[in-house]
Amino acid sequence: MFSGSIPALATPFRNGSFDEAAFRKLVDWQIEHGASGLVPCGTTGEASTLSNAEHHRVIEVCIEQAAGRVPVIAGCGSNDTMNACLHMNFARKAGAAAGLCVAPYYNRPSQAGLIAHFSYLAENCGLPIVLYNVPSRTVTDIEDDTVIELVTKYPDTIIAIKDASGDLSRVADHRMGIGREFCQLSGNDELWLPHAAAGGKGAISVTANVAPALCAEFHEAITAYDLKRARELNDRLFPLHYAMFSDASPAPVKYALSRVHDWFAPDVRLPLCNASEASRKAVDDALEHAGLI
């Protein structure tokens, strides 16, 4: 099962196209510095502005470059169930360990619609599913009872959840309704510590893009019950967690990566813009605080 520091990888662009060489370097750097898994084509990976061909190529390159060293949880979400299934089937054939499936956005399905959507994926795609609940972006909330119903119905297929709801009570609700071993991953870096204390197994992290070693060490301190060290690392990382969202994500994290690596360009795709001057300052200050520049 998944655990630890799992970066939600940014997708590098150069001259408007997927920069495959930079992405391969990013994958290697993440694994070499402690990532326990990788998530391509999530929110941070700008999946919403990738064509299907690009989306699949990013997944394929990530799996190829990881070469079995860590599991790859491929971003497969869509507000079109059939397109999500297309992504899931491609990711399965490419060798992904699971598909990260966000709640369908924009069309705002009911809880019954969510159950039907995820049930279709579970029954027709042959790839384990990590639910992804981020109502601040999707508007639709995968409610606790819905998660419990889906996991109870498909215990061997719906194997984990990335929870970016910001509601820490859900960790206990899921543990009580599903079981203590159900894999819960934080989707909010700033809540990683209390989420872990409540029973979480790790985080699918934005900050880990630029601070993989620190995030891996942070998780190790948590699992060793070294609260003093975990707090020290949390304090060191905390400004960075907020700086990553000082402008529309993933512009700040791409700027941060460009400060750490000369081979990573800060470019994002429209309708996003590159990080503002204020955001760049926040990122620079946070990188200095963390000792990364």
Image: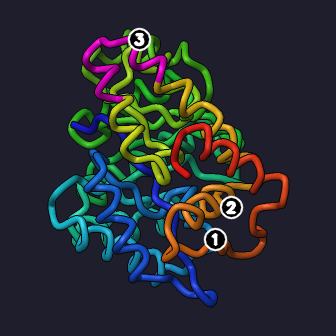
The percent coordinates of residue 255 (x first, y second) are 64, 63
Look at 29% across and 27% down and name the residue there.
220
Observer-nearest residue: 223 or 110?
Answer: 223
Which mark is in front, 2 or 1?
A: 1
**SS at circle 1:** loop
Residue type marked 1: Pro
The magenta-colored residue range is 219-232
Q: Is 149 rendered above or below residue 280?
A: above
Q: Is 104 rendered above or below residue 130?
A: below
**SS at circle 2:** helix
Q: Is 243 rendered above or below residue 28?
A: above
Look at 31% across and 32% down and name the residue there.
153
- Can residue 39 be seen at all in this image of the molecule? yes
- Can residue 127 be seen at all in this image of the molecule? no
The quadrant of the picture occupied by the N terminus is: top left
The percent coordinates of residue 74 (x first, y second) are 37, 59
**Which secondary structure class fits the magenta region best?**
helix
The percent coordinates of residue 10 (x first, y second) are 51, 63
Which mark is in front, 3 or 1?
A: 3
Within the magenta stretch, is there residue 220?
A: yes
Cα–Cα gap, marks 2 and 3 = 32 Å
Residue type marked 2: Ala
Q: Quadrant of residue 121?
A: bottom left
Look at 25% across and 61% down and name the residue there.
96
Which mark is in front, 2 or 3?
A: 3
Disc on res. 218: none
- Find disc 2 in the rendering and name its residue: 251
- Badge 2 or badge 3: first in the primary sequence: 3
Cα–Cα gap, marks 3 and 1 = 35 Å
Cα–Cα gap, marks 2 and 1 = 7 Å
The percent coordinates of residue 53 (x first, y second) are 45, 84
Disc on res. 266: 1
